[in-house]
Amino acid sequence: MSFHFKQKTAVSGDSQSSDMVRVWDIVVRIFHWSLVATFAAVWLTSDDFVWLHKILGYGVLVLITVRLVWGFIGGKYARFSEFVKSPGAVISYLNDMRNGRERRYLGHNPAGGAMILALLFALLVTGVTGWMSTTDAYWGIRWVEIAHELSADGCIVLVGAHVLGVIYASRKHGESLAKAMVTGLKQRV
Ligand code: HEM
Ligand code: HEM
């Protein structure tokens, strides 16, 4: 009796194996999960722990700044040039989604790319208006306070849409995008 073992094409945990490819570099992954944690903490502290809220808010601004720089000098899939598409391309991708025939992307899809820009912008506005409200020039100015509250609410709405989008795309293409944001690895297209 002879035993026959099939040659494995992909070894789990091996980023160089034939069908897995490293998409998210270490900076993107650390940025993402640090942002999730800091953003949650900045919300939880906004009413009763304002001193901590301010420190965490600056933390969000530091993270966003690092990501903006990384968008120009980071790895292939981290670069804005890779995932920022024209409004026309985003609309045509959304149309494809409506018809259920959008294609899978290894990096961010066009709608995901637009969402990332919106998130980074909303977080930046929230952080800057929060900081402004503590300066001599803008302290107690109503529009600055309102802008801070409204942009913070905008961040929550965008985060909700972002997470729904991640769940939708994961189901559609039968893969866990959240897991890929942890390991950095995705199945080659
Ligand atoms: C537990 C909740 C969350 C999950 C599961 C999640 C998951 C993900 C995943 C899978 C991606 C990559 C999407 C893709 O494959 O194209 C991503 C990207 C991103 N997410 Fe989230 N996310 C969460 C919460 C948040 C929150 C709270 C924020 C902001 C406050 C956020 C901001 C971002 C940003 C900015 C990116 C772009 C990453 C980059 O290229 O640097 N996410 N997220
Ligand atoms: C980007 C991340 C930030 C988010 C998501 C955020 C969110 C919030 C939220 C939801 C509130 C409560 C608004 C209300 O209903 O009254 C708030 C209040 C406030 N935030 Fe922020 N904030 C951020 C960054 C900052 C920064 C960087 C500073 C200043 C350094 C700051 C300073 C304040 C102050 C002074 C208040 C008023 C607190 C009070 O007296 O009740 N925030 N923020």
Image (tube, rainbow, N blue to C red):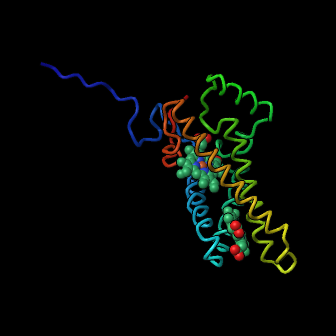
Q: Nearer the viewer, residue 52 or 184?
A: 52
Q: Residue at x 65, y 74 (%)?
A: 55
Image quarter (top left, top right, bottom left or bottom right) of the C terminus: top right
Kindly give the residue lying farthest to the top in the view shown. Answer: 1
In the rendered image, residue 51, in percent from the top left (x then y), is placed at 65, 79
Q: Quadrant of residue 131?
A: bottom right
Horizontal relation, residue 170 to residue 139: left or right: left
- Asked if residue 137 shows in the view, the reply is yes
Image quarter (top left, top right, bottom left or bottom right) of the N terminus: top left
- Asked if residue 25 shows in the view, the reply is no
In the rendered image, residue 22, in percent from the top left (x then y), is placed at 53, 41
Kindly give the residue lying farthest to the left in the view shown. Answer: 1
Q: Is residue 97 above or below residue 59?
A: above
Kindly give the residue lying farthest to the bottom in the view shown. Answer: 136
In the rendered image, residue 135, in percent from the top left (x then y), is placed at 81, 78
Q: Residue at x 65, y 68 (%)?
A: 59
Q: Nearer the viewer, residue 165 or 181?
A: 165
Q: Nearer the viewer, residue 80 or 129?
A: 129
